[in-house]
Image: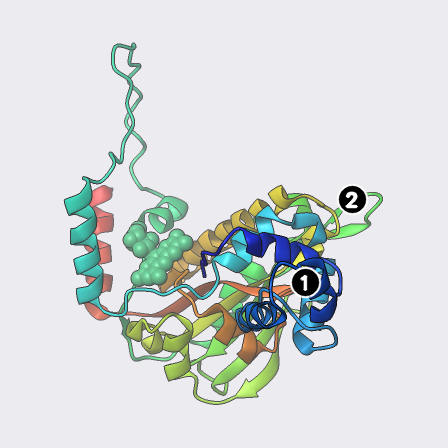
Amino acid sequence: MSISADPVLIRLLDLFGDWRSEEQVSRLLAQYTKSSIRTTVRQLEKYTLLVREGTPEAQRDFQFKQAWSGWLPSAGFFHFGSKDVRYCATRHELKKKLRRLLANSPQPPFFKTYENVRRLHLPTATGARGEFLEVLMSRRTHRRFSVQTLSLSSLSNILYYTWGVTGSIPSGVLGDLPRKTSPSAGARHPVETYVLALRVEGLPPGLYHYATREHCLELLRLGNFDKKAARYCADQAWVQRAAALFLMTAAFPRVMWKYNSPRAYRTVLLDAGHVCQTFCLVSTWLGLAPFCTMALRDTLIEKDLGLDGISESAFYVAGVGLQWPTDTVRLRNRLSASL
Ligand SMILES: Cc1cc2nc3c(=O)[nH]c(=O)nc-3n(C[C@H](O)[C@H](O)[C@H](O)COP(=O)(O)O)c2cc1C
């Protein structure tokens, strides 16, 4: 949301820095009529720029200030200011937008090189032999899936090797910290994972929380979430044909407790990126079709997960399905071509 207003509004908001009644503020701004101040206050309330003492909004505001105090204002502005944005609703709209961008200016170059410097040629990279390189070279984003169900053992492998606790790190003062397959700044591991089971063999469709230490699923709600899956991902219709979605959230206090600076917000973003790449590789290793998306309806996800959006917030979504038959063939061809 962005607003524009007369600079005098800053003065008014500043006067409401502490709890004050309209009456008190009117006295301090004697050059304005009481009714104009009342109208302005109502407008500010409507857009939640002012909250009334004792209301749920004021309580939420207090909770926010307490929880986020160390990361304000920059990280708070960025996190809350970038929630629930509007995405292109159709391919047509996206194409139109891209054409408009191109008409404005060409794409910036994808590659940087230096002119007039000595170049040292490197040996050709080893062919993609061996399981690791095959997996690495095969990873890609899948957006269509076969209708088969995902086996429970595949789901279990994905969860354990991506988000599970695989060991511990003796840290001294802070005791044993969890070790996982992805790095995490300070081993704080702020990412929580909720499984939206759409088509998993032996697992009733529904919403589950993954307990990382116990390696088990905690049932939150049963139900068919196919349509909701697409809605969570900003109406990307193909998402509902996946077998499972992994709704990742950030449990901020884990990081805030140790790192009392807005810069630490970056670690949460970076952690989520690391863990999602691990997810993509594990899923590829299992011969599955992974994807990830940041086009999310954050608040809807938070509401359905029962999160306050302040101490734990929707962050990233990954998903997996069974490979579409022709994608498997193409993958094999590409692999043999790269060997
Ligand atoms: C942070 C992030 C967000 C993404 N969001 C979307 C998305 O909303 N929809 C989508 O179809 N793909 C999404 N992708 C996938 C990218 O479009 C994809 O990685 C890119 O086109 C390169 O293709 P590849 O993954 O097959 O190499 C996202 C990827 C990342 C890393």
Percent coordinates x, y for residue 316 in the rendering: 48, 61
Residue drawn at (37%, 83%), measured in percent from left and top?
A: 227
Q: Secondary structure at mark 2?
A: loop
In the image, 248 versus 323, the foreground residue is: 248
Residue type beneath disc 1: Phe
For marks 2 and 1, the one nearer the N-term is: 1
Left or right of 296, for residue 94: left
Percent coordinates x, y for residue 99 in the rendering: 15, 52
Which mark is on residue 219? none
Which numbered disc, 2 or 1, marks the residue closer to the eye? 1
Quadrant of the rendered image holding ligand 1 = bottom left
Left or right of 102, for residue 80: right
On the image, which quarter does residue 44 sit in?
Answer: bottom right
Is residue 282 placed above or below 137 in the rendered structure?
Answer: below
Dot 2 beta carbon under 8 Å from ligand 1: no
Residue drawn at (72%, 45%), measured in percent from left and top?
A: 260
Percent coordinates x, y for residue 155 in the rendering: 48, 71
On the image, which quarter does residue 88 sit in?
Answer: bottom left
Specify few, some or many for label 2: CA neighbours under 10 Å numbering under 14, 14-19, or 20 or more. Answer: few
Q: Residue furthest bottom?
A: 223
Q: Secondary structure at mark 1?
A: helix
Q: Which residue is mark 1?
A: 64
Q: Which residue is mark 2?
A: 171
Residue drawn at (33%, 64%), measured in percent from left and top?
A: 87
Residue type beneath disc 2: Ser
* Image quadrant in which the N terminus is located: bottom left
